[in-house]
Image: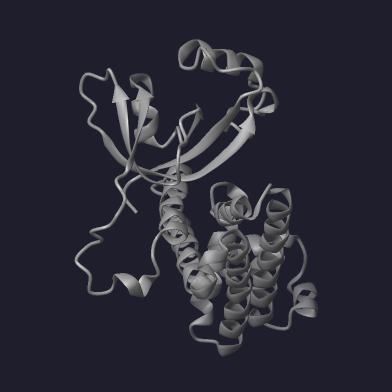
Amino acid sequence: MFGTLADRGPTGLTLRAVAERAGCTTGLVLHTFRDKRALLLHARDLMHERTRVRSDALEADAPDAGSALRAVLLGALPVDRERLAEARVWVGFLAAALADPVLAERHAANSRAFAERVTRLIESAYPELHADSAERAAALVAAVEGVSSLAAGDPDGWTEARQVAAVRTVILAVTTGSAPEDDLGQGGDMDAPTPDTIHFHQKHHEAIVSGEKVTTVRWNESVAVGAATFVFDGHPTAEPLVGAVTAVHRYRLDTLTAEQAHQPPGTDMRRFGQQLRENYYPDMPDDAVVEVAELVLGSS
């Protein structure tokens, strides 16, 4: 019934439709699920369990709490067929829950579980934000669920790059900005730090603009999380772009993996290091500690 709800929505989720998809009789379906509400509840619980298992795995594989927070949030986005189906089930269940208090309670309980996970990760990664971690988590959850809803209805318009960029922008604002109430009634932050300037070779302009390139590997540049200006050296027409660094990870060059550097699987990382040295950092030693900075366009 999960696939039926994803494909047909709540109005198309009938005993007959589920039976046809499963290749069985409606009587057999009715023996397991007494009514449409039971079908919906089962689909929602199945979706919750799938996302819980995925989030548990992402959290366990992350090297630190900050990485876990970003992995869990970005891992919830509908960027492939499986997660797009989950997003459509989420939207369909919510639509049905508007007129059914039993469904509404289940929906709220499962959503609270996700928010509690995000709150815990914020508190672990950013102890200084503990006082309003729940409010910050609510903003992140709203961003993920909002983008997921939009992508469920318009998957062509909400590409993977657009989804990730939108949520990364909110992650940056939530994890580096002031408390929400601090900005009420203010005309601007006069003490806001000057954005860092990050220089790129002109060949990277198109990939940055399109969202294809979302990371950069640097050595001895002290890239910091926060607002940034992207400058494309030597480009004849490109203007500087407003953006931000949402995360910085540090690795030894001689142990850097393709996954850590956000390179395609199978990338020759020894050659990758050689190209960094040949093109940008001729004095960089083999055991240098490099920074992998995650980037997003737009102002926080």
Residue with the most extreme bottom position = 101
Q: Residue at x 23, y 74 (%)?
A: 185
Left or right: residue 29 versus residue 267 is: right
Instruction: Establish if 189 lies above or below 252.
Output: below
Q: Is residue 178 visible?
A: yes
Q: Position of residue 41 (x, y in %)?
A: 66, 77
Q: Position of residue 100 (x, y in %)?
A: 55, 87
Q: Position of residue 240 (x, y in %)?
A: 25, 33
Left or right: residue 140 versus residue 267 is: left
Instruction: Establish if 117 lies above or below 148.
Output: below
Residue nearer the viewer, 239 or 156? 239
Instruction: Establish if 81 lies above or below 235.
Output: below
Q: Quadrant of the N terminus?
A: bottom right
How many numbered marks does the figure carry?
A: 0
Q: Residue at x 51, y 12 (%)?
A: 282
Residue nearer the viewer, 164 or 296? 296
Q: Quadrant of residue 269?
A: top right
Instruction: Establish if 98 lies above or below 19.
Output: below
Q: Quadrant of the C terminus?
A: bottom left
Q: Residue at x 45, y 51 (%)?
A: 168
Residue nearer the viewer, 126 or 29? 126
State how the image is colored: one colour
Left or right: residue 183 versus residue 101 is: left
Residue nearer the viewer, 290 or 24? 290
Q: Position of residue 257 (x, y in %)?
A: 67, 29
Q: Is residue 10 visible?
A: no
